[in-house]
């Protein structure tokens, strides 16, 4: 019997993976990818899935499961691909045994991110197939296709999604579940021991698979053509992934515009050439960066008119929408109302009662006593310390950069150089930087603001909970300079005093303000009440 | 028939619960639905919105185009106005008149309500007062859904009422009854409009 469920794009991917017989899911939380792993943890106890310390450990664990013959899913937000990149790119060289699907959730328009990098480039870079679902049903269906494709080619497969698919709900028809693979390790060591001699052979095999990948994309059911009859069209559209929806919203058939939908890469060059031969010009609509547009330009030559993000027909940055795509095919969407007069932005803020607030109150107080104190921030809820009323941090770049930037700035002569990093971000990518600072006896003060959870993404387990003092001591921070405080207004005197003392200490100090996230605490109290 | 609805409010006001109820009703009635939500950073007291599209035909875009929303349902008056360019010429705004002031430069309340009042089809009611008057302070969002129910058209108020029972079932009969009562208060509040 066919069952229909209302699912977020993320949930459709999760259920698709469960039904495709996945044995392990490895992930670090990151908007908009988090709900994939959460769904699997909630609904499929038979699948191994505990949050990983970072995206690289996730990718490597998946590779181990694949080595053993079973199917593994890796999920992350787009910038997580940068962290996983070493393992990801080399997994294309080893190849896989059990299927591996890597889901990268891109965030064009940077709703919750610091850049809008397009993960499809990573797929091209690693020379593996890329899938890009246009809707929730495809996201579900593609998981079994992706695992089968991965095992057929013996390569990992990248699935690239965007925020609007990840966080949009629609009805999805689900199929019968498949059994998990049996344990069957790959005994061919030359696949897995990437000494140069083996790696050259493996890389040659990856290069040899490229024509087959191209044929599979050309024949894929996910790449389809919607024509407009025999006559020549003024404009045709190459619509990648979710951009297909924004085109179809305008009923292009009615406008005499043929559409080539692309949801499996390498770009199906034959289909693009066929479309070009029946049109005077092409529009390439793709969310993210103009990857396909550049390829189409290279394919069709300088004389063939191609419109898209590079030509200016579509905005160069930001997510696409029905309005921008409509305008690019000549439909003017006239709004009836102008923007209202009495509307101002309402930026997000740290919750009332949040411990990070007390940390910034204390830091601001002490920093004001110095001529040139600098506070290097990091990625998490506490990045909101950049906004009023705190305006406390001078930088926020990538996971872990607070500690290492403070180190570099201290090396250059800045004092005090203070780093503020959350508990989960510290274990994700802060520990190695702290070791650098200890080894170099850097004059920095590190605040690990510990709220016992990964709060920004909704309260997932944090890898280092109950281990932070031990980690810092193990990395070589002097025991008398690892200080723990409780961030509450009533403790302000004590906290500011400790910050002053540790700034004055010439070396690495770590202060750990520790108090549970107000969101997870409230949730726990509610659950208790229900019970 | 199609209905494009923008749900608006401030993080934590419960607009995703409204979306869940409408989604459940649509799924049960066999009406196609797409509903784009906001997750992540913006939920921390910032503005939040959800694009909810209902149709008897296939729906492509997850996002609503400018000038084509049939309804804006908002838990907060300034947030209702934020999406005005998306409203269709014959579209309608259903909003709470209670301001949520967590920013220093919130506009003058009188100006804000005057602008809402100047729109052709806007209904603004003090939903939190109505909910509190009936000892249902936690159900203001469902009361707002009641106010909007008869304008959703592609689903009947009765279908939405049944969904409230399903969506809150896990929280016990008392919670279901409270929310259905809030829904009815909202429904009655616009009976003559």
Image (cartoon, helix red, strand yellow):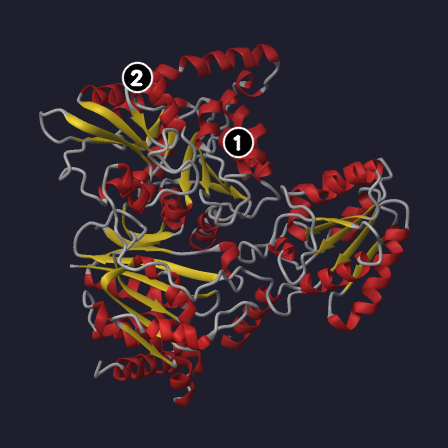
Which of B128/A389 is in front? A389
Q: Which element type, helix, strand or loop, lies under badge 1?
A: helix
Which of A468/A116 is in front? A116
Q: Which element type, helix, strand or loop, lies under badge 2?
A: helix
* Subunit bearing disc 1: A
Q: Is residue A156 visible?
A: no
Badge 2: how crowded within 10 Å, few (<14), some, or many (20+)?
Answer: some
Describe residue A179's horizontal placement relative to residue A346 as left or right: left
Describe residue A479's horizontal placement relative to residue A312 as left or right: right
Which of A510/A113 is in front? A113
**Residue at (76, 56) in percent of width and height:** A512
- Name the residue that disc number 2 marks: A300
Q: Is residue A170 visible?
A: yes
Describe residue A86's horizontal placement relative to residue A165 as left or right: right
Residue A45, compared with residue A195, is above or below; it is below
- Name the residue that disc number 1 marks: A63
**Residue at (61, 52) in percent of width and height:** A380
Quadrant for residue A199, please give it. Answer: top right
Describe residue A118's horizontal placement relative to residue A258 as left or right: right
Which mark, residue A207? none
* Image x and y of residue A12, in percent: 36, 48
Residue A160, compared with residue A190, is above or below; it is below
**Residue at (50, 55) in percent of width and height:** B40
Badge 1: how crowded within 10 Å, few (<14), some, or many (20+)?
Answer: many
Label 2, label 1: how far apart the Cα atoms are: 38 Å
* Image x and y of residue A448, in percent: 73, 53
Residue A323, compared with residue B69, is above or below; it is above
**Tag in front: 2 or 1:** 2
* Subunit bearing disc 2: A
In terms of sequence position, does the residue under pointer 2 or pointer 1 come before the other?
1
Quadrant for residue A157, please give it. Answer: top left
């Amino acid at each position: 019997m066919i069952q229909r469920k209302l699912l977020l794009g993320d949930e459709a991917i999760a259920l698709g993976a469960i039904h495709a017989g996945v044995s392990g899911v490895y992930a670090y939380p990151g908007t908009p990818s988090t709900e994939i792993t959460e769904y699997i943890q909630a609904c499929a106890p038979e699948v191994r899935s505990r949050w990983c310390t970072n995206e690289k450990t996730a990718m490597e664990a998946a590779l181990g499961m694949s080595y053993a013959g079973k199917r593994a899913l890796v999920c992350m937000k787009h910038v997580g691909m940068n962290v996983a990149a070493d393992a990801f790119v080399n997994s294309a060289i080893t190849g896989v045994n059990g299927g591996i699907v890597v889901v990268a959730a891109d965030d064009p328009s940077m709703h919750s991110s610091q850049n809008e990098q397009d993960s499809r480039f990573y797929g091209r870079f690693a020379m593996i197939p890329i899938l890009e679902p246009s809707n929730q049903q495809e996201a579900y269906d593609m998981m079994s296709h992706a695992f089968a494709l991965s095992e057929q080619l013996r390569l990992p497969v990248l699935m690239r999604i965007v925020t609007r698919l990840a966080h949009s709900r629609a009805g999805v028809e689900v199929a019968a579940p498949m059994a998990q693979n049996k344990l069957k390790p790959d005994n061919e060591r030359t696949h897995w021991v990437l000494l140069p001699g083996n790696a050259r052979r493996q890389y040659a095999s990856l290069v040899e698979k490229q024509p087959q990948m191209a044929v599979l994309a050309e024949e894929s059911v996910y790449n389809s053509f919607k024509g407009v009859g025999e006559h020549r069209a003024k404009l045709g559209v190459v619509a990648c992934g979710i951009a297909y929806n924004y085109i179809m919203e305008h009923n292009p058939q009615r406008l005499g515009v043929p559409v080539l939908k692309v949801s499996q890469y390498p770009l199906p060059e034959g289909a693009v050439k066929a479309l070009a031969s029946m049109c005077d010009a092409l529009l390439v609509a793709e969310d993210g960066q103009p990857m396909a547009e550049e390829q189409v330009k290279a394919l069709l030559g300088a004389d063939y008119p191609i419109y898209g993000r590079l030509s200016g027909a579509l905005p160069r940055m930001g997510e696409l929408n029905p309005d921008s795509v409509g305008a690019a095919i000549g439909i003017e969407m006239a709004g009836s109302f102008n923007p209202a007069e009495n509307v101002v932005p309402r930026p997000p803020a740290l919750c009332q009662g949040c411990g990070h607030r007390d940390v910034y109150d204390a830091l601001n107080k002490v920093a004001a006593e110095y001529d040139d104190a600098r506070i290097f921030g990091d990625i998490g809820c506490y990045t909101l310390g950049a906004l009023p009323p705190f305006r406390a941090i001078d930088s926020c770049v990538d996971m872990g950069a607070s500690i290492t930037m403070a180190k570099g700035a201290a090396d250059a002569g800045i004092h005090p150089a203070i780093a503020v990093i959350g508990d989960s971000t510290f274990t994700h990518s802060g520990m190695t930087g702290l070791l650098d600072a200890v080894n170099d006896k850097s004059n920095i003060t590190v605040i690990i603001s510990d709220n016992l959870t990964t709060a920004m993404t909704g309260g997932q387990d944090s890898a280092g909970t109950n281990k932070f003092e031990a980690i810092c001591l193990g990395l070589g921070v002097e025991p008398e300079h690892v200080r723990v405080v409780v961030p509450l207004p009533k403790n302000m005197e004590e906290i500011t005093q400790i910050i002053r003392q540790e700034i004055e200490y010439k070396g690495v100090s770590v202060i750990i303000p520790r108090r549970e996230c107000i969101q997870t605490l409230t949730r726990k109290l509610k659950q208790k009440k229900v019970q | 028939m199609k209905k494009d609805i923008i749900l608006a409010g401030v993080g934590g006001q419960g607009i995703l619960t409204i979306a869940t109820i409408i989604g459940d009703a649509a799924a049960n009635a066999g009406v196609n639905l797409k509903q784009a939500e906001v997750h992540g950073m913006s939920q921390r007291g910032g503005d939040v919105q959800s694009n909810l599209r209902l149709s008897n035909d296939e729906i492509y875009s997850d996002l609503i185009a400018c000038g084509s929303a049939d309804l804006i349902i908002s838990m907060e008056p300034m947030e209702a106005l934020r999406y005005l360019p998306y409203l269709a010429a014959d579209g309608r705004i259903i909003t709470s008149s209670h301001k949520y002031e967590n920013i220093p430069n919130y506009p003058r309340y009188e100006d804000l309500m005057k602008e809402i009042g100047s729109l052709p089809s806007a209904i603004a009611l003090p939903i939190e007062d109505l909910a509190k008057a009936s000892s249902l302070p936690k159900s203001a969002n469902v009361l707002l859904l009641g106010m909007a129910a008869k304008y959703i058209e592609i689903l009947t108020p009765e279908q939405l009422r049944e969904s409230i029972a399903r969506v809150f079932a896990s929280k016990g009969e008392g919670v279901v009854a409270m929310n259905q009562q809030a829904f009815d208060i909202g429904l009655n509040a616009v009976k003559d409009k």
